[in-house]
Amino acid sequence: MAERAKRTRVRLAAKIDNRHAAAEKSDRGMVPWHVRGELILNCNCTVFCPCVVSLGRHPPTEGVCQAWAGIRIDDGKYGEESLSDLNVGMILEIPGMMARGNWKAAAYIDDRASHKAHHGLIQILSGKAKGTTGLFKLLVSEFLGAERARVEYENDGKLRRLRVGRKIQGEVIPVQGKDPGRDIIVENTKYWMGPDITVATATKGRVRAFGRVWDFDGRSAEICAIDWRGPDV
């Protein structure tokens, strides 16, 4: 009886040690991860966002940047936990040039996400997971919070739509170029989202979240295929 109790204590201690080791690994940004899919963003710039080509060294057209974003994850993992088929909504507030930091950010995580997937997405979006989004840890000075919510990301022809209840209601559509049916795309950039950015405009861009009330209908928007990943560990 005593021997059985001892074995039980040993197993429990091993489980606790494993959990602590996993937590420490996560805190150090040592968990492998990747996210592939699409991102849309709508900001308060009156013309196409200058951050794409200036890499944050040119101020937003309105002096400050206010934006909402939606992420559709087609394929993703955080460690062994799947992130595939999940959606995320975000709001961003930047007091001046993007590269100078002092960002405020908040996230709405798909309520279908498991506990581990929810944790992983927060690590990725806060920059703690390092890799592609690692700079967020330096640029975001205040993370306003991460809430579970029903996050809907829809493709309706060329129109992209994001809905997070009444908190974020957004629609963006590409701007067509000279040739009929061909969108304007800024290619081969060093932008953090991805190298090829489709120039878009918002047909709806309304935020009622975290004390912010924004209406960016008709303002600058972007569409970008994303392929983000963590550091090699």
Image (tube, helix red, strand yellow):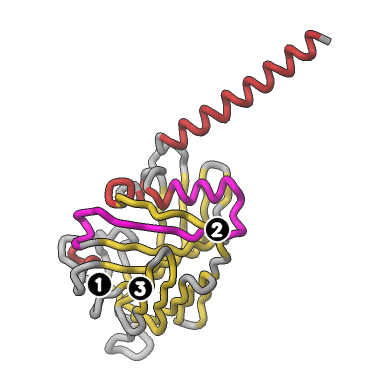
Cβ atoms at labels 2 and 3 below 8 Å apart: no
Q: Is residue 231 left or right of residue 108?
A: left
Q: Which class describes the residues within 10 Å of circle 2: few (<14), some (14-19), or many (20+)?
A: some
Distance from the alpha carbon under mark 2 to that under mark 3:
21 Å
At 26% from the left and 64% from the top, the residue drawn is 188
- Residue type at mark 2 is Arg
Q: Hey, which residue is sitting farthest top in the picture?
A: 2
Q: Is residue 192 left or right of residue 62?
A: right
Percent coordinates x, y for residue 171 in the rendering: 44, 79
Q: Which mark is residue 148?
A: 2
Give the secondary structure at mark 2: strand
Above or below residue 52? Residue 216 is: below
Amino acid identity at mark 3: Asn
Magenta stretch, residue numbers: 96-123
Q: Which residue is mark 1?
A: 49
Residue at image location 70% in from the left, 17% down from the top: 9
The mark tally for this picture is: 3
Q: Residues within 10 Å of mark 3 (few under 14, many from 20)?
A: many
Q: Are marks 1 and 2 in contact (CB under 8 Å)?
A: no
Q: Which residue is mark 3?
A: 42
